Image (tube, rainbow, N blue to C red):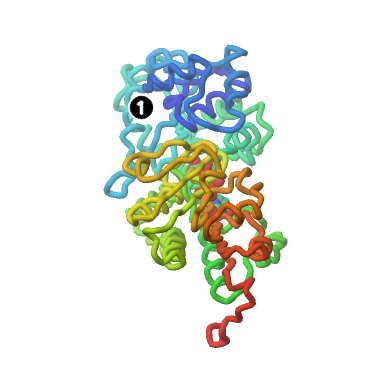
Amino acid sequence: MKISIIGGTGYVGLITGLGLAVHDHDVICMDGDSRKLNKLNNGELPIFEESLPELLKEATDRNKVVFTNNIKTAVRESDIIMIAVGTPESKNGDTDMSQLILALKLVAGFMNNYKTIVIKSTVPVGTCAMARMIIKDNLNHPMIPFDVVSNPEFLREGNAVRDFLKPDRIVVGVDTPESEGVMKELYSTFDAPLIFTDTRSSEMVKYACNAYLATRISFINEISEISEKVNADIHAILQGMKLDKRIGSHYLNPGPGFGGPCLAKDLKSLINFAGKANADLPLLKAVLERNGLQIKSITDYIMSELKDVGSKKIAVLGLSFKAGTNDTRNSPAIHLLEKLADTKTTIHVYDPVVKNLEEPLHSRVTFPENIEDTIKDADCLIVMTEWPEFKELELKAVYNMMKTPLIVDTRNIFAPDKAHNLGFQYKGIGIADSLYKNIDVPLKNII
Ligand code: UGA
């Protein structure tokens, strides 16, 4: 089939376009960003993502993808037009739909025959219905037939190529048999359950999934807090929980709070449009609130342990919002640095792929070239991202390099007993320092 992706050099647009191209569709990735288009036309990628170089190579070697800023050709030459533009949070808390609305208007103006318009962007429930009206109002030839379809994405950064090529399921919201037929053909070569719903339910599936994942993370972060206070061990607790098949093992890693451009943004958007539909969502509001507490309690711990923080040196490992990506949007590490930046403490940072930050943070911190130079003479080592090379660090060598052996491991990547045996003061999430010092919690704190 012939497919155009509007927003085709963005994260979702590019992976979707290249993924469909290797499934033998003819894809046009259309975008207004000439810098990214130039890169792609030179065989370079504008984003860091595992397996994406191979996907780009395969799609281009087979001549299955074109990168262009020509929206007119993109629309006219395609059967399916996928819209994958950004829908960020606007200042008043609403979802900013301006890019989507502009894309719909432009597409409508260039349509020359029947098109299936697929909304990939994450959008409030009811957007497909709104899109139909926008297209109708902007058609150049009023009688051109079209359908609007919802097809949310479930791509995780760092895992997105696998998530696209081997999805758990594909969700499609349609309102006509004709568009259902088109979408069946589009995904006919994918080995995954294809779920058809109405467009509103499909739009809601996306929010329900992200809200549920966020809820699990906030839940385990809350259990971690209480575990620390009563000297229980989150590793042991998770072992006991995960084997319960009803609970399972995913999205239960305690940490510095969920970051990135999606979970928090989508939760806020859901709470916002639910409010307009008279639904208050107290549980999901609490999930967000809990998330904000993580960085606060980590910072409070560091400040209280370091005491005269202005005279100390802090080493931070990891800047991206999770391992496997160079994305620092809404990264817990950045939120931590912003808090530490207000003090006079010396901050050394290391990340395998992030080598720049936005100002004024960039000038406030030092970027040593390697992990060793980052840790050397530090009074506190803070692990913010679970990159494999951090997990492989030899703790004894780390101990010998640091000035004061204090580790704050917000991803629980080190073995706490090993750290303690070496002489570290070790603080994980859900693992109190006192757990390994045989300090009993006073009974009055428990019963
Ligand atoms: C998330 C969803 O997982 C995708 O399905 C969805 O398509 C995407 O948002 C989106 O809406 O576009 P992503 O934000 O890339 O994907 O990353 P996740 O792997 O879900 O992680 C989000 C945050 O939660 C990260 O900061 C991560 O470190 C944190 N996390 C994740 C935990 O703290 N604990 C966990 O157990 C899992």
Locate residue 243: give its quadrant: bottom right
Q: Residue furthest left?
A: 92
Depth order, front residue of 172/334: 334
Quick check: 418 above or below 356? below
Depth order, front residue of 265/392: 392
Check disc 1: other Cα within 10 Å, few if <14, some if 14-19, many if 20+: some
Residue at screen point 64% across, 54% down: 395
Residue 349, position as x, y percentages in the image: 47, 45
The N terminus: image quadrant: top right
- At numbered mark 1, what does the secondary structure look like: helix, strand or loop? helix
Please indicate whether residue 243 sits to the left or right of residue 175 in the image: right
Give the residue type that dot 1 points to: Ala
Please indicate whether residue 235 sits to the left or right of residue 80 in the image: right
The C terminus: image quadrant: bottom right
Locate residue 177: give its quadrant: top right
Residue 159, position as x, y percentages in the image: 59, 38
Quick check: 282 above or below 198? below
Residue at screen point 57% across, 36% down: 160
Quick check: 323 above or below 345? above
Q: Does residue 283 appear anywhere in the picture?
A: no
Residue 311, position as x, y percentages in the image: 39, 58
Residue 147, position as x, y percentages in the image: 45, 28
Depth order, front residue of 424/233: 424
Q: Does residue 258 appear anywhere in the picture?
A: yes
Locate residue 106: give its quadrant: top left
Please indicate whether residue 40 sits to the left or right of residue 280 in the image: right
Q: Kindly identify which residue carries mark 1.
A: 103
